[in-house]
Image (cartoon, helix red, strand yellow):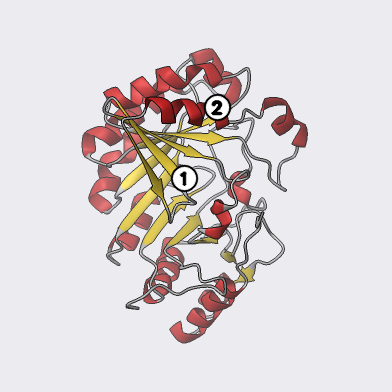
Amino acid sequence: MAEEFVKDKFERPIISLRITITNRCNENCIYCHHDGMISSKDEMTPDEIYKICKIAKKLGVKKIRLSGGDPLVRKDIVEIVEKIGSLNFKDISLTTNGVLLEKYAKDLKEAGLSRVNVSLDTLNRDTYKFVTNMDYLNEAKAGILKAVEVGLYPVKINMVIMKDINEHEIKDMFNFCKDNNMVLQLIELIESENCDDDKFSAEYHYTLDKVEERLADIADDVKERKFMQGRRKYYINGGEIEVVKPMDNSKFCANCTRLRVTPDGKIKPCLLRNDNLVELISYIRNNESDEKLEEIFLKGIDKREPFNTD
């Protein structure tokens, strides 16, 4: 295993690999940009995902995150995690809406999953139905609490803040997280080249600047996460809040340490671009050597460049 991280030409180390294992989801959130992915019905097998992670491990990647869509709609999700878990990464995490988490949490923990991020924008049932176009709030909350129970720590709640929808619920969500030993992540609504309706962001965008000023005023302690886009963590009365503002913060790009893989097996060097993807899965299916696959990974890393520089 590499002793040091591989770095791109901008001297950014590649610490983590985010694999979107499906575009399928059991909800239809109004702001979803599908993790910056082009829509595809193709999905990789557990063995193919394992192979990708094995090569990433050789190149020094320490962390794996599985995302979607919603990864839990895949019936082989426990097998996928188990195979990745056999490679002994420092951290294996998963992003989900939580709807199926109660069913899978215990098995995922035993398979090697370290922790989960759960997308939950509201504790109000009507608002939840408006945002997700589904009525699964109770299932999502049950899944979240199950994740805490089995030790998928820390459970992080991703709350996208939207004007006139849920910006007034931050305090309630913070208390819910604090009471259940979870971390709250406030996420500023962003635009993506894959959004079907750019007007949505313009109508519902809510800047977190003033929220962050308020948090700084009342926080017992504040820490900055250098290798997580410079985002700040605010510790308040035993609770914890992180603020995520990627589009308005050039530190997001300057400190980006993540490489991505699409559901159909392409390396995606940048969250915000789809014009520089690097084909990978066909080489795996043609049983190319590990050396060849490493070469392709390095090609993907070489295509990385900051999207925002100002």
How far apart, in angstroms, are the residues tagged by discs 2 and 1?
15 Å
Seen at 30% across and 50% down, the residue is: 113
Examine the rendered structure and indicate whether residue 222 appears above or below residue 132: below
Q: Do tag 2 and tag 1 residues touch (Cβ < 8 Å)?
A: no
Q: Earlier in the sequence, mark 2 or mark 1?
A: 2
In the picture, the quarter occupied by the N terminus is: bottom left
Q: Is residue 287 visible?
A: no
The location of residue 150, given as percent across then percent down, is 22, 38
The location of residue 182, given as percent across then percent down, is 31, 32
Examine the rendered structure and indicate whether residue 86 appears above or below residue 210: below
Examine the rendered structure and indicate whether residue 274 appears above or below residue 171: below
Would residue 256 be found to the left or right of residue 34 on screen? left
The location of residue 75, given as percent across then percent down, is 42, 47
Which one is closest to the eye, mark 2 or mark 1? Answer: 2
Residues 272 and 231: in front is 231
Q: Residues within 10 Å of mark 2 (few under 14, many from 20)?
A: few
Would residue 75 be found to the left or right of residue 10 on screen? left
Residues 121 and 4: in front is 4
Seen at 50% across and 67% down, the residue is: 12
Q: Is residue 94 visible?
A: yes
The location of residue 207, given as percent across then percent down, is 61, 30
Q: Which residue is mark 1?
A: 231
Seen at 28% across and 22% down, the residue is: 179
Tag 1: amino acid: Arg
Q: Secondary structure at mark 1?
A: strand
> Residue pushed farthest front?
217
Seen at 42% across and 64% down, the residue is: 15
Q: Secondary structure at mark 2?
A: helix
- What is the number of the mark on residue 210? 2
Residues 134 and 241: in front is 241
In the picture, the quarter occupied by the C terminus is: bottom right
